[in-house]
Image (cartoon, rainbow, N blue to C red):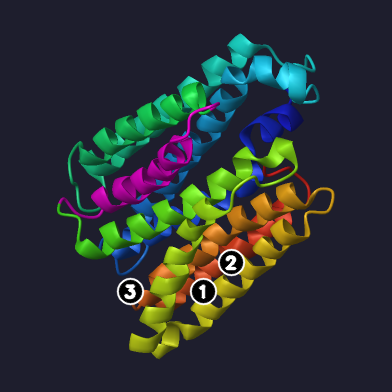
Amino acid sequence: MKLRTALRLGRVSNLPTVWTNVLSGSVLAGAGAIGAEFAVMLAAFSLFYTGGMFLNDAFDAAFDAAQRPERPIPSGEVGRGEVYRWGYGMMAAGIALLAVVGLGMGARTGLLPAVAGLMLAATITYYDWRHKGNVFSPVVMGLCRVLVYVGAGLCITRALPDALWIGAALMLCYLIGLTYIAKQENLGKVESLWPLAFLAVPVAWGAWRALAQPVTGAFWLLFSAWMLVALWYLRRRAKGDIPRAVVSLIAGISLLDALLIAGAGSLALAVLALAGFGVTLFFQRYISGT
């Protein structure tokens, strides 16, 4: 498989949003600094994401042949079976890396991170298999990001604190709204706007947090402003605006992570999450994020 094909299959431009998810999950679980195990965690969850993206194309090969023949499998760049093997292989490697962290690094929380990884792999596979025509698929996609938070948190502690569950719930709401929009990409329009109310939940939480902790106000303003930019594309609905809104909201995942980290009091790490937002936008210029 050519490198260019692998990069397109993996939608690797969006990987920084996974890295900031891992950072946010770690901070919300109580990590005060980044240790050596963090690099292994980043590698593990990167493998889950990339493997899941490979499987998405493998399961969608028939649909893509009719609707998006330029994708790697229908265009003949790579075989469907090879993509399946790479996808499952990467997720298996991700589970193994989480076992390494749990059994031999950091807090040594045992096999709990690997169990969370197994649950994540199963949820990713189910989404890729059944997301077409499934009204609940945005919820399933959101649960994938929730399990990144849970898996990262379990690398830090056996008892996940309320702060992590709140952050995961806010990310779930954001992903439900985002995924609903992404499912309309091929239609060129959004048929109903009510699921977008889910996007308002983290905005409302951020406003409340900014009142209680003013230092987070700057992060909330940036997140809210970027949300308005993405939603403006939906309102304008010129050619290409739906995909533009989708990739903008994907990059916004890192902004929400930054807001959550700032809300937990780790401003330096929140700034690091902002860097993930910038890197995502940069990568999306060269590799499609959808």
Element at label 2: helix
Residue found 61% across the figure and 21% down from its top: 60
- The quarter of the picture where residue 208 lies is bottom left
The residue pinned by badge 3 equals 264
**Residue 154 screen position, x and y as percent:** 24, 48
Amino acid residing under circle 1: Val
Q: Residue lying at the far right in this picture: please name it.
A: 239
2 or 161, which lies in front?
161
Element at label 3: loop
The residue pinned by badge 2 equals 275
Asked whether disc 1 touches disc 3, contact meaning CB atoms under 8 Å apart, the reply is no
Give the magenta part as a residue range.
132-158
Amino acid residing under circle 2: Ala
Amino acid residing under circle 3: Ala
Q: What is the C-alpha distance between the residues marked 1 and 3?
A: 13 Å
Asked whether disc 1 touches disc 2, contact meaning CB atoms under 8 Å apart, the reply is yes
The residue pinned by badge 1 equals 271
Q: Nearer the viewer, mark 1 or mark 3?
A: 3
**Residue 265 screen position, x and y as percent:** 34, 78
- Up/down of 238 relative to 230, above or below: above
Q: Name the N-terminal-most of marks 2 and 3.
A: 3
168 or 188, which lies in front?
188
